[in-house]
């Protein structure tokens, strides 16, 4: 969990740069959308599994948006990814189950990998 947060912070720092033209797709947008979906998933699943993290994952999503400063369609796609992750698991899990715990672990691992890959590829 700590590695995901650390990698996430590095990614947000590396990706925040000069503003891009509105709605111009960045080469890493697909990865950012997937990361947003993972953050939405973690926000929901960690909440039902009693993590007592409050809005931690939602705040991480806000930090990603703030760092990337997308506008128009890019911002809408990132927000939609977060909501898709949250809503998709809300429909599947009402309580914390062993499968939910496994899903949390897998999504933390995937999010960490995306963050590491983005950092390695796009960091200056």
Image: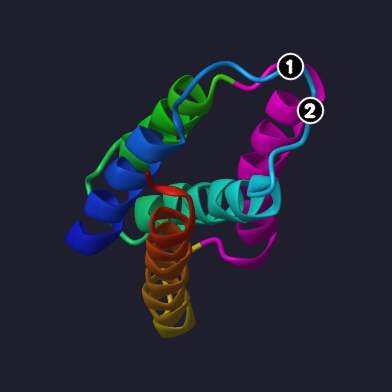
Side (left or right) of 75 relative to 95: right
Which label number is shown at residue 24? Answer: 2
Which residue: 22% across, 51% down? Answer: 6
- Residue drawn 39% across and 28% down? 63
Residue segment shown in magenta: 70-94
Q: Residue furthest left?
A: 2
Q: Nearer the viewer, residue 81 or 11?
A: 11
Magenta segment includes 116: no
Residue located at (61% from left, 42% from top): 82
Residue 71 in the image: above or below residue 24: above
Above or below, 59 relative to 32:
above
Mark 2 residue element:
loop
Which residue does the image show at 57% across and 65% down from the upper left?
93
Q: Give me the disc on residue 57.
A: none
The part of the image, by quadrant, that contains residue 50 is bottom left
Q: Do we see residue 51 in this rendering?
A: no
Instruction: From this view, report whether residue 56 is shown above or below residue 37.
Output: above
Q: Quadrant of residue 11?
A: top left
Left/right placement of residue 73 relative to residue 17 reads right
Rounded to the nearest angstrom, the CA distance separating label 1 from label 2 is 6 Å
Residue lying farthest to the front in this orientation: 124
How many marks the image carries: the answer is 2
Quadrant location, the C terminus: top left
Magenta stretch mostly in which secondary structure? helix
Please give the residue where the numbered disc 1 appears in the rendered image.
21
Magenta stretch: includes residue 88: yes
Residue 99: x %, y % from top left: 48, 83
Q: Could you say where residue 53 lies in the image, as x and y percent from the top left? A: 24, 43
Mark 1 nearby-residue class (10 Å; few <14, some 14–19, many ≥20):
few
Residue 78 appearing in the image? yes
């Amino acid at each position: 969990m700590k590695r995901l947060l650390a990698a996430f912070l590095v990614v947000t720092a590396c990706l925040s740069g000069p503003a891009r033209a509105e709605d111009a797709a960045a080469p890493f947008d697909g990865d950012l959308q997937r990361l947003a979906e993972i953050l939405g998933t973690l926000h929901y699943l960690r909440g039902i599994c009693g993590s007592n993290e409050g809005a931690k994952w939602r705040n991480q999503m806000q930090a990603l948006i703030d760092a990337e400063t997308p506008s128009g369609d890019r911002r809408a796609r990132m927000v939609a990814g977060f909501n898709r992750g949250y809503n998709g698991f809300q429909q599947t899990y009402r309580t914390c189950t062993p499968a939910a715990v496994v899903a949390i672990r897998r999504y933390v691992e995937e999010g960490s990998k995306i963050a590491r890959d983005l950092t390695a590829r796009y960091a200056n």
